[in-house]
Amino acid sequence: MSSRKVIELFFDVVSPYSWLAFEVMCRYRKVWNIELRLRPTFLGGVMQGSGNKPPGLVPNKFLYMGKDLNRLSEYFNVPLKPPADVHEAMFKKGSLNAMWFVTAVQEMEKSGDERVERVSRELWRRIWYEDRDITEPASLSEAAMKAGLSDSEIKRALELCNSQEIKEKLKSATEEALDYGAFGFPLVVCHLNGKPELFFGSDRFELLAHCIGEKWLGPLPDKSTAKL
Ligand SMILES: N[C@@H](CCC(=O)N[C@@H](CS)C(=O)NCC(=O)O)C(=O)O
């Protein structure tokens, strides 16, 4: 068997399109010969650093995205439902605290990304399905509890959240994404023959599969992995 290709997924839980890409990559890591590396990052920093602006700030794009996400939710089997006040949730409240928290959880992982996967999913579910806060410590705790973290792990993650170490870690992941050429999320970076190949969006999987020599079997490659 050829050696596994390393694929990095840069994501932020404020980004609904990142949720779609995240679920697809988590499903395909069991199907393709890849090593998936989850890279929690801050989309606000990527927008600022690249000179881009969120597509939701253009009124017609905002209207289109509402319809697009509705269709995609069904197609990808990911329970997406925009919060009542998208601008408040995405731009006023934002995701900095949540992404510090996910970074802290990643820092605490001994091996693998299992908890990062579960906690990120619960945070997406809160903001992009239940229309609930993801900025307050109580909200982060609740998401982590649902993700199966123990009380002491949650306490430690909340402490770590405020540490300089974690803030620096999230900042350097954001800088790394920008160095790759990020301007938005999701960003999938495939390492092919020692060279990073970038794919922006949750709508590039067919092309990505072609480039890495794997088969795209649609959003649900294995029905048993698709329960959310
Ligand atoms: N066509 C992409 C759109 C992804 C997208 O709009 N991502 C937002 C964040 S949720 C973004 O960062 N956009 C930057 C841009 O469109 O320039 C997809 O289907 O995934």
Image (cartoon, rainbow, N blue to C red):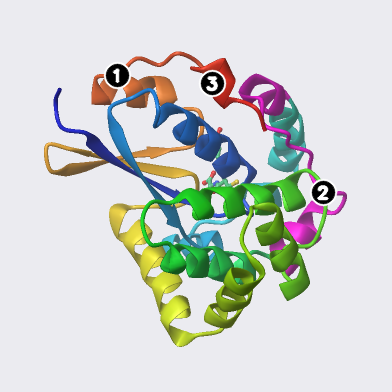
Which residue corresponds to mark 1? 214
User: Which circle's residue, 3 or 1, is located before the other in the chain?
Assistant: 1
| Figure quadrant of residue 198 | top left
Is residue 19 found left or right of 73 in the rendered image? left
Quadrant of the rendering where the C terminus is positioned: top right
Percent position (x, y) of residue 85? 85, 54
> Residue placed at 41% from the left, 78% from the top?
168
Q: Is residue 55 above or below residue 71?
A: below
Callout 3: helix, strand or loop? loop
User: Which circle's residue, 2 or 3, is located before the other in the chain?
Assistant: 2
Which residue corresponds to mark 3? 219
Residue found farthest to the right: 84
* Mark 1 closeness class: few <14, some 14–19, many ≥20 residues within 10 Å: some
* Closer to the eye: label 2 or 3: 3
* Mark 2 closeness class: few <14, some 14–19, many ≥20 residues within 10 Å: some
Is residue 153 found left or right of 143 in the rendered image? left
Q: Which residues are magenta?
A: 71-93
Which residue corresponds to mark 2? 83
* Mark 3 closeness class: few <14, some 14–19, many ≥20 residues within 10 Å: many
- In this rendered view, identify the residue nearer to me: 219 or 137: 137
Callout 1: helix, strand or loop? loop
